[in-house]
Amino acid sequence: MPSPTPRALLTGLGAAAFAVLAGCTPHLGTAAQHRAAAPAVADDLPPGPAATTAPAPTPTPAPPRQLAGVGPQTLARIPQQTSQVVLVTGRSRDSSDATVVLYLRTADGGWQPGAAWPAHNAKDGWTDDHHGGDLRSPIGVFTLSDAGGLRADPGSKLPYHHSRGFHVGGRGFRGEPLAGSFDYVVAIDYNRKTGVSPLDWTRPMGESRGGGIWLHVDHGGPTHGCVSVSETHMKQLLATLDPALHPVVVMGDAASLSR
């Protein structure tokens, strides 16, 4: 018998066999069987619970910002009503290099920092027991009540005493000229009477405890006990420090402030 042709072979196998060769499902049956085996469509399913959207998680509020590097003992010395802090952080106990940051209290009780400014403090660093001539800046929290300077008031919110008594000459510890250092000053209320000119030399704790500790214009080197920043930053302090916000300076070397 002659061999069947390919067409005859396909005809003899039928459509079902052809489907197998084409790679389709191997289960063969009638159209009714296929309909019975087909998965149910959505209309065939019983109604389920209505879809719900999970509520978005409530974001956890960020904790209030604190005064960088300031520990609990130092924080406790800041008056409750204070809303402005000039934070002076010395590099180390015996260093004359420091950084100044002006902080403003926020509505949540935290502190918003401004820019960090380079500064100088006393030649030999910092002390908890300042005495006149020790060439160290006093560590502590001190109010800021009065300002002044050789030059006219640039717009100070603090009471400002304009006087030629702020003239200074000579040279600093690095040979730098001191002229202009007291063009603008803010008195730090260490061993001084408040509500008067920074030039008032009343010493409530006695002459031996020193005084005349100011924020003033930087002359490019260490001070005798004051803290100095650039003229631009002194003007910014004068324009910002507000008696109604009870400003203070928090000052010392980093290790001491962290207590």
Image: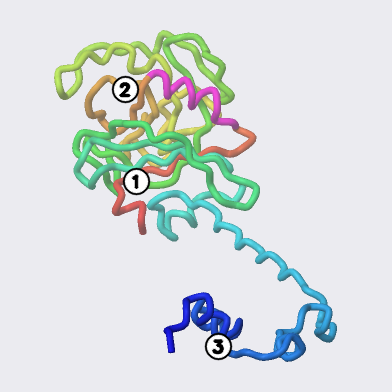
Query: In this rendering, would 114 be left or right of 110?
Result: left
Give the quadrant of residue 117. Answer: top left
- According to the picture, the residue beneath numbered tag 3 turns out to be 26
Query: In this rendering, would 46 be left or right of 193?
Result: right
Where 213 falls versus 10 (above or below)? above
Q: Are marks 3 and 2 in contact (CB under 8 Å)?
A: no
- Label 2 sits on a secondary structure element that is loop
Q: Amino acid at mark 1?
A: Ile
Residue 116 is tagged as none
Where 173 falls versus 46 (above or below)? above
Distance from the alpha carbon under mark 1 to that under mark 2: 20 Å
Q: Is residue 233 magenta?
A: yes
Residue lying at 83% horizontally and 79% vertically, measured from the top left: 43
Q: Amino acid at mark 2?
A: Asp
Where 125 falls versus 214 (above or below)? below
Distance from the alpha carbon under mark 3 to that under mark 2: 92 Å
- According to the picture, the residue beneath numbered tag 2 turns out to be 218
Magenta stretch, overall SS:
helix
Distance from the alpha carbon under mark 3 to that under mark 1: 90 Å
Q: Which residues are magenta?
A: 231-242
Classify the position of the C terminus by image quarter.
bottom left
- The residue at the far front in this view is 1
Residue sitting nearer the eye, 235 or 79: 235
Q: Nearer the viewer, mark 3 or mark 1?
A: 3
Give the quadrant of residue 149. Answer: top left
Which tag, 1 or 2, sits closer to the chain's start?
A: 1
- According to the picture, the residue beneath numbered tag 1 turns out to be 139
Which tag, 3 or 1, sits closer to the chain's start?
A: 3
Residue lying at 33% horizontally and 17% vertically, measured from the top left: 181
